[in-house]
Image (cartoon, rainbow, N blue to C red):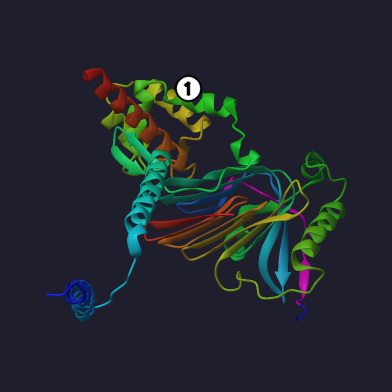
Amino acid sequence: MSEDLKEEIRKLREEMARMKDELRDVAGKEQRKSRGLYIDFGSNMHDYVEDMMQGIAEGVHGELEKSICIGPGGVRILRRREPMTEEEQKVSFVKAAEVMSALGHEHRLKILQALMNGGEYINELQQKLSEITTSTLSSHLNVLEEAGLVVQEKVRGRYLITLPGRTAYKMATQVSRFLEKRDEE
Amino acid sequence: MMRQNLELDATVLKTAEDLTFLKTDRSIVKIDRDTLAVALKIEGRQRGYIFHGQCKLLVDTIVETEEGAVGKSVEMEIDKPFLMLGKAEEQQGHFSIAENRDLAIKGYRSPKEFTDKAQELLDRFFKRGMMGDCPCYGEGEVFAFPNKDETLDVLMLKGSKLTCKIAKMMFVSDANKAVLKSGEQIVVSTHGRACIVKR
């Protein structure tokens, strides 16, 4: 065979190999098209997705750190609030101390507990809390009323736990449960 | 507005005993004996009195909610002339004629001085003779007390419905419903379920 003919055959083989590759690519695209949407991301897709996922993960992690509260009642997710104004941030420490002082007696906590299910007359409270004498019970009720945790209907005579009273009682009992649990561990 | 014929009696009376005008599960209004009184007629019919003596007012302006009670009991000692409309005929047997001594104890030099004060109060409440509908006609009671801000606090009762306005607080209650409006919040309670709206 002459050199020219050999060269001609070599070029034809190269041409055929190239055409086979092209044909394979076209066939692959056609197959993917037949399954649905085909998007050519190119070679940077993997990096793009990785960057995006990293950003999402960092964002979620940051939000969770700010919003998750783990307390004695379990895991709670707090809703984001607008920052408090300076006026809202003012605290009357005198009033706060008065409330804490009112809560700072076992008998008074038992009185609040007894009122959690509805108003009671003093004789009904006396029956429920028989370990407390009448005069002591009246004294405790006065303290709770002064602190705004309890209110008395002057006409009907019943004692009712107030909205702050309910909140204060729940706070005191939740904190005590948390501390008890921590001490057990 | 229709002009009503308001007429204060010229005779000054005094109560012969302690009287309780109102006693419900949420409110009490009572006066001591020797309280001065002058009768009020509207359109020729006895409709009420102006009193001046030791008066005690108690109103439980408290709304019970699932999250706790909101409001407070109002307790007031009133020693200025106040108005009562309604139950006029029921009270008639409880008075005697006031003497100058009784008037002097309350700071009045003559019966006219007391009736002039009573007329001032009437003018404030009824706006100088022009009066709209008054719920006291036929049933119900209305009380109007002057307060330290020189406005009138009002308490009205008709059947089971109580309406009270004391200073900036308003309270309305019926058998199963209550509404309390104070400076900071409005509380609405219906059949034990409540909604608190912060202002």
- Left or right: B149 in relation to A107: right
| Residue closest to the eye, A140 or B48 | A140
Write down the quadrant of residue A119 in the picture.
top left
The picture places residue A17, in percent across and down from the top left corner, at 18, 72
Q: Decide whether residue A161 is among the magenta residues.
A: no
Query: Which residue sits furthest top?
Result: A183
Residue A122 seen in this snapshot: no
Label 1: how many residues lie within 10 Å, few (<14), some (14-19) or many (20+)?
few
Q: Residue A20 placed where, x, y %?
A: 18, 75
Q: Image quarter for residue A128?
A: top left
**Residue toward you, B22 or B166:** B166
Q: Which residues, given as a range, are shown in magenta?
A: B4-19
Instruction: Say which residue appears at 67% left-offset and 69% top-offset.
Output: B46
The residue positioned 35% from the left and 23% from the top of the image is A107
Residue at 60 percent across and 50 percent down: it is B184
Query: Which is more toward the observer, B164 or A98?
Result: A98
Quarter of the image where the N terminus of chain B is located: bottom right
Under mark 1, the amino acid is: Ser
Q: Would you say residue B18 sits in the magenta stretch?
A: yes
Q: Which residue is mark 1?
A: A101
Query: Which type of secondary structure does the marked residue at label 1 adopt?
Result: helix
Considering the image in quadrants, where does the C terminus of chain B appear?
Answer: bottom right
Q: Position of residue B80 (x, y in %)?
A: 74, 47
Residue A57: % across, % down:
36, 47
- In the image, residue B41 sits, relative to residue B66, either above or below, namely below
**Looking at the image, residue A175 lies above or below residue B154:** above
